[in-house]
Image: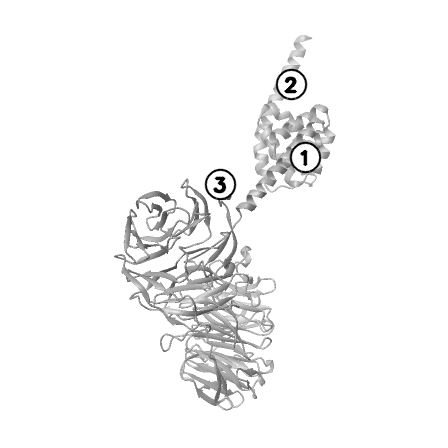
Amino acid sequence: MGTKSKLKEIFEVESKFGAIFTGGSVEWTSDGKILICQCGPVINLLDVDSGQLTGSLGNTDDEENSVSDDTVISFALSADDQHVVSSHKSGLFRLWHIPELKVVKLWKSVHKGPVAKLALTFGGTLMASGGSDSSVRLWDLVHQSCTHNLLGVQGVISVLTFHPDKSRKLLLGAADDATIVGWNVETGKPTLTLKGHFSRVSALSIHSDNNHIISCGRDKVVILWDLNKQCAVSTIPLYEGLEGLALLPKGISLPGNRKVENNMCVAVAGERGVIRVWDLSASKEVYVQTNSLVSKAKEEGSLAVTQLLWNSDSYTLGVVSVDHNIILHKIDTFQCIKQFIGFSDEILDIAYLGAEDSHLAVATNSTNVALYRVSDMSCSLLQGHTDLVLALATSRVNPKLLVSCAKDYSVRVWYLTDDGNTAKCIGHGQRHTAAVGTVQFGQLSSEIFASAGQDNCLKLWNLPSKFSEDLQPTVLNATFTQIAHQKDINSVCFSPNDKLIATGSQDKTAKIWSTEDLSLIGVLRGHRRGVWCVRFSPADQMLLTTSADCTMRLWSLQDLSCIKSFEGHESSVVRGEFLTSGTQLVSGGADGLLKLWTVKSGECVSTLDQHNGRIWALAISLNENYIVTGGADSLMVKWKDVTAEKRQAALEEKEKLTIQEQQLLNLINNNELLKALKLALRLQRPHQCLTLIQGILKKGDIQGLSETVCQLGPGQQEDLLKYAVLWNSNGKHCYTAQALLSVLLEEISSGKLRLEGLRSILEGLLPYTDRHLRRLSELQQDLHLLAFTAN
């Protein structure tokens, strides 16, 4: 009984972390507190301080404000931070009121094709839309009518913004033809044309003097323009394709005690992934970022940074990267103060890290490892790999150690810093000849780990017992190498005593090796498809294997025979782990289901469903109170073990029920039938209610019954009405039912009781009532006939 009471049965979702930004635009409110991010069919409001979503435009249960699967193409924020206007795949425009998260206006676009850019005036009364049809249109948002069709540009609109000086009545825009055009918003006529770029204009900023604008583009130049003279003041070549531009105010400080003394200073970023600060008046570069967290574009012409954001309230510069990360830097130090992972794509592996599981390391479809602090889910990126990271593992002996492997044929060992803000690479090795798909630390020692991958090789690595104080990376060498399988190796693990290593492969076998020299001990055959995961039992001499044949198997290490097979998943079982001292299993499959099993009985105790795709990653906290899963749906789910709480709640409910049942018996024995009726209704005891009402009617206390029914809540009155309908179907109880119905119908007719499903309830009542009436009428006739015959 002791073991059974410790078994886990119920896990509930404590938190979910999904996509917050899947590409497109990001806007920053003027107070610097909220980032507004485009995410598929919704627009998310992200709190900068907490990193949590404060709301979503379009993601509501209210059908009127839901956009279902209508993807957002572009959106714009009004200058007063009160409104957002969005264009959708369906060709609709929606105007949102941010404080209420509601659609204020909805109307049809007249553009031919998607609307690439939008712009709003301060009060959200005038809107400009730039389409892929080479047209720019002005809209009166009060009447949702198109007032002007603006001509003068060719191609997809790339830049669109209203001039902040209302007296100018100017709208600026640019398209694929690299020409910047200004239109008068009252007449709709072009008033200025600026030619100087030779490729698409990617960003444009209006100077605070309202007379100058700065533009950059894919032609690798920044141009300062004079609006009054309608000409270029200076053209500065930067030798990289540019996507982001932010105008910096006069007097700000930069790293290295550099101070911006003039008001013509801009920050730009592009395919190099580095922020550069330029003094346009002197055509001089004053600062180049040295701590960039954005990887350089893989080839010339591709993207690294897609957008730069500047917030004057917090003096913070925001970088939006091509892999959907948002990174915030303090301008005076360029120190990274916040990182937000907008979209993880597929989550390939998760591992707990740090003392008391303080951090989560997450491998996604990225070259970086995402390191989350569990307390607030703040994130930092670990850079080092040059291709996608595939697997992670941590050491039980030294929880600050993390090992990662990737498609770049390498393994890297990381050490969590004392402040917990990041982890430093302390060792790297590149001895594999193909992608490394699995890695694992020893159970008793943090000085050994094993790796395996697509080169079919199993490698054993040694780490030094002590690392240098400055944590400088050292080159690691494999101590043993073995060609272990005929196909890709998917999983590797150490036995609890570190004397054995198990591997699982796509060749449908699992193998057991000696840690001493990687000599083969045995081969486990039986799976009909590839083996995805292998794990040693922490308590018994058993090995768990999960396979693409939809099953899990337990194998004896003594004779290498299959002890038990677990079936229940409808697709490949990708991950499996032992729980509760080896008495339970938890598995994640390609069907998106997380299943909890009891080893002894082989039964599935619980099935948990939150993922919409394959579960790749599964991590269990040290105290086994939490399970974190990640999958192909970019969703990371944190599950909490609530078995003890649910058992305690059930026990308390049982005790409460016992006390109430005793109270009910006491009331019946004391002949307090009306009070007993209230309690019986609360306990939902229809038969006992029937007996009590019959007792009340025998006493002739119709008035007391009526008063008691009036005192009941609407829910209890509805239950009583349903009971009456049920009793009315039996001739023995029809008198009781009809007496109760007369009381309830008075409540309904007076308007005190209102029921949504009253029609359906009465439909079940009328046929039996009609039958009882006919039966009583016939009985009355028989009585009259009997009386007549007797007289």
Nearer the observer: mark 3 or 1; the answer is 3
Callout 3: few (<14), some (14-19), or many (20+) C-alpha neighbours within 10 Å? few
Residue 378 visible in the shown view: yes
Q: Quadrant of residue 731?
A: top right
User: In the image, what residue type sits under mark 1?
Assistant: Lys
Q: On the image, numbered disc 1 is attached to which residue?
A: 678
Give the amino acid type for the residue marked by disc 3 in the picture: Lys
CA–CA distance between discs 3 and 2?
65 Å
Q: Earlier in the sequence, mark 3 or mark 2?
A: 3
Contact between marks 1 and 2 (CB within 8 A): the answer is no
Q: Residues within 10 Å of mark 1 (few under 14, many from 20)?
A: some
Position of residue 627 relative to residue 251, above or below, is above
Dot 1 or dot 2, earlier in sequence: 1
| Residue 141 x, y percent position in the rendering | 57, 69
Q: Which residue is mark 2?
A: 780
Where does residue 452 sit, x and y in percent of width and height?
A: 32, 60
Between 23 and 60, the one nearer to me in the picture: 23
- Residue kind at label 2, given as amino acid type: Gln
The residue that label 3 is drawn on is: 4
Q: Residue at x 36, y 78 (%)?
A: 300
* Apparent side of residue 636 relative to residue 518 in the rendered image (left or right): right
